[in-house]
Image (spheres, helix red, strand yellow):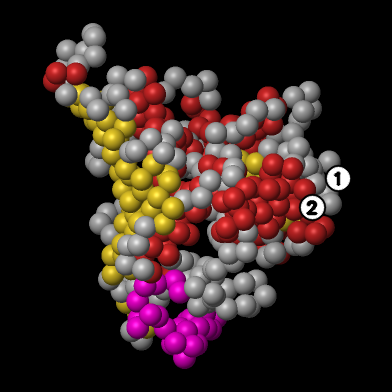
């Protein structure tokens, strides 16, 4: 593979378009783009040129000649089935998060990855932000000692008075965002902590932050009534993490903190990208005279200039580079199928914990067949199926709040009226 240009396909033309320049900058070729929406599929030709093949059917896309690897950037909860089909054909997979939306999908995904000659990697970009890379460097250097406790917050509040933006995010009451439990979008808060420390969650408990959001659709509430879920994990090294899913409280920020035996390190909440490194006075490393320091990490990376042009603090570039390097070097990614399905299990089982007011759930290790068997038929999902099948588990722990069929129909009616008023 190292002797030829890697030919990549992109499945999901909207989010996938954000990666086009990153792929090309890493000396790979985008040969095919697929999106069920013809608008986004055809947009690829405008951005990449007429030589790229475009498809609106995955069955046709997967048959594209010479396809080496595919980035899955389709809907949040629909990656696993397509990843499995690609792995079965020996095509490398870079999958946007989350890895799987049900426990049974996680089992099937791991089994497919283990049988495949191809590489599977989760496309999680937040660990590659400069301050997270710096926290990993310091922690892995050993001067802080063993991690005891860590925090990860992904706070992404939205303006719910902006009806047009709300419609764009949730065009129908069956859209995945409308039905997204607050624990499910967990990778941006949890992955950096796992990346920094190497700890793997083994048990999870979760509690809701209940505060219904009122849209301006005649007072009809949109989506789940929780603003966040607060999850606590006990890890394989006896450390404890506290993380949010995709939270809708406070101001927009991404915050991470690692507390260890001899001190702590965190990124500051002032938007500067600086970190705070704070040692116990009695545990100062050699050649360190001050216990507390604030500084801006300066990464020495040969591709720094290219990364600065990419999204998510350069994370979009680095995740593509890592994936392509893993293919070229035939090595296992750190964000492999076990990493991805562990985080998905925290999200899925964390939601069940929240539904049961904090009852703890053990996180399975899908390297173990006995753990796989336990979940291989667990298809509970809060999402509507592509064929219109109903959700099989509630998206909120407040069933008294959850909208009736009539309430959802009214939301859809109001959305439809707003769309018609634009024309």
At a point 33% along the width and 38% down the height, the residue shown is 239
Q: What residue is shown at x 65% (from left), y 71% (from top)?
A: 386
> Distance between the Cα atoms at labels 2 and 1?
8 Å
The C terminus - image quarter: bottom right
x and y, in percent, of residue 248 in the image: 33, 61
At numbered mark 1, what does the secondary structure look like: helix, strand or loop?
loop
* Residue 16 screen position, x and y as percent: 61, 50
Nearer to the camera, 164 or 74: 74
Q: Give the number of the disc on residue 62.
A: 2
Query: Hey, which quadrant is residue 48 in on the image?
Result: top right
Query: Range of the magenta residues?
Result: 394-423
Question: On the picture, is 313 further left or further right than 250?
Answer: right
**Residue 245 visible in image:** no
User: Closer to the camera, 256 or 303?
Assistant: 256
Quarter location, residue 367: top right
Q: Residue 65 got which mark?
A: 1
């Amino acid at each position: 593979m190292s002797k030829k240009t890697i030919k990549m396909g992109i499945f999901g033309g909207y989010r996938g378009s954000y990666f086009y320049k990153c792929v090309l900058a890493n000396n790979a070729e985008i040969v095919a783009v697929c999106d069920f929406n013809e608008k986004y599929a055809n947009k690829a030709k405008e951005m990449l040129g007429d030589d790229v093949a475009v498809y609106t059917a995955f069955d046709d896309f997967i048959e594209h000649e010479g396809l080496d690897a595919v980035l899955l950037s389709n809907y949040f909860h629909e990656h696993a089935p397509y990843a499995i089909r690609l792995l079965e054909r020996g095509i490398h997979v870079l999958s946007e998060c989350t890895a799987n939306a049900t426990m049974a999908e996680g089992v099937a995904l791991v089994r497919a990855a283990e049988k495949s000659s191809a590489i599977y990697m989760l496309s999680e970009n937040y660990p590659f932000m400069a301050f997270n890379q710096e926290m990993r460097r310091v922690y892995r250097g050993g001067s802080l000692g063993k991690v005891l406790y860590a925090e990860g917050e992904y706070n992404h509040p939205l303006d719910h008075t902006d009806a047009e933006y709300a419609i764009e995010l949730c065009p129908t009451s069956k859209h995945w965002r409308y039905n997204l439990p607050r624990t499910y979008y967990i990778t941006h808060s949890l992955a950096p902590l796992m990346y920094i420390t190497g700890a793997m969650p083994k048990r999870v408990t979760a509690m809701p932050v209940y505060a219904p959001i009122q849209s301006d659709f005649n007072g009809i509430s949109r989506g789940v009534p929780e603003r966040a879920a607060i999850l606590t994990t006990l890890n394989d090294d006896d450390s404890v993490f506290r993380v949010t899913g995709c939270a809708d409280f406070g101001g927009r920020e991404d915050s991470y903190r690692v507390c260890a035996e001899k001190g702590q390190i965190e990124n500051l909440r002032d938007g500067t990208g600086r970190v705070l490194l704070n040692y116990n006075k009695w545990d100062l490393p050699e050649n360190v005279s001050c216990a507390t320091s604030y500084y801006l990490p300066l990464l020495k990376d040969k591709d720094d200039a290219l990364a600065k042009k990419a999204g998510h603090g350069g994370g979009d570039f680095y995740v593509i580079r890592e994936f392509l390097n893993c293919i070229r070097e035939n090595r296992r990614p750190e964000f492999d199928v076990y990493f991805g399905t562990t985080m998905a299990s925290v999200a899925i089982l964390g939601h069940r914990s929240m539904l049961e007011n904090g009852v703890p759930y053990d996180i399975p290790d899908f390297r173990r067949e006995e753990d796989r068997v336990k979940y291989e038929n667990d298809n509970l999902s809060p999402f509507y199926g592509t064929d219109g099948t109903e959700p099989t588990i509630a998206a909120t722990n407040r069933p008294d709040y959850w909208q009736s069929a009539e309430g959802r129909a009214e939301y859809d009616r109001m959305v439809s009226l707003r769309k018609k008023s634009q024309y």
